[in-house]
Image (cartoon, helix red, strand yellow):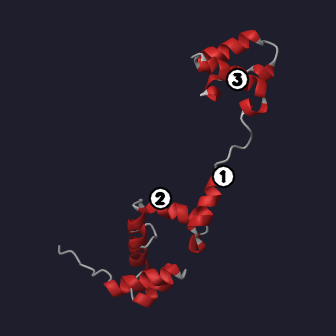
Amino acid sequence: MARMVHPGLSSAQKAELWQRWKSEQSLSDIGRALGKHAGSVHGVLSANGGILPATRCRSSRSPSTVSREVSRNGGSTYRAVEADSMAWHQACRPKPCHLVKFPILQGIVARKLSINGSPVQIAGWLKQQYPEDGSMRISHETIY
């Protein structure tokens, strides 16, 4: 049985598709305007993660990564500077480090590290030296 071949979209149609997609038209509306089924439109968009190929190529990231970044940070109103600023803000620690809150502990840990004590040894030593004082305890992972 012979396979039916459906011609794809021309360059002009693809350009119009991307322009309409950028102006937030639905797949059905874009398909109607191009005289194609919405599934054809969806195929072109999904193959590129909903991101214009030239934009994606400049970033050297996969379509899904770029799409996730854009949708997470405003969609069609995406601005890279604002997204970067928000990412740095969200990366901040929710609370200050234990060593910052207890300067005496910080000094002891720094002194022990300067004489080549390992974080595991220091954490164990603190537990032995100050068994009743919770503020003088710290995990070896925090020291790292």
Name the outermost residue toward the right. 132
Q: Nearer the viewer, residue 52 or 126?
A: 126
Neighbor class of circle 1 (other Cα within 10 Å; few <14, some 14-19, many 20+) is few
Tell which circle, 1 or 2, labels the residue nearer the N-terminal end. Answer: 2
Name the outermost residue toward the left. 1
Tell which circle, 1 or 3, labels the residue nearer the N-terminal end. Answer: 1
Residue type indicated by callout 1 = Gln
Q: Nearer the viewer, residue 13 or 72?
A: 72
Distance of mark 1 from mark 3, alpha carbons?
A: 25 Å
What is the secondary structure assignment of the residue under circle 2? helix
In this figure, which residue is indicated by the disc labeled 2?
Answer: 65
Q: In this view, does 106 lie above or below 22?
A: above
Residue type indicated by callout 3 = Ile
In this figure, which residue is indicated by the disc labeled 1?
Answer: 90
Name the outermost residue toward the top. 128
Residue 43 in sight = no
Q: Looking at the rendered structure, which numbered label has been put on residue 77?
A: none
What is the secondary structure assignment of the residue under circle 3? loop
Q: In this view, does 32 lie above or below 50?
A: below
Instruction: Check the picture and name the quadrant holding the C terminus.
Output: top right
Q: Looking at the rendered structure, which numbered label has been put on residue 138?
A: 3
Residue type indicated by callout 2 = Thr
Distance of mark 3 from mark 2, alpha carbons?
A: 38 Å
Q: Is residue 142 left or right of residue 64?
A: right
Q: Is residue 95 left or right of residue 49?
A: right
Neighbor class of circle 3 (other Cα within 10 Å; few <14, some 14-19, many 20+) is many
Provide residue 133's location: percent of width, then percent of height: 81, 17
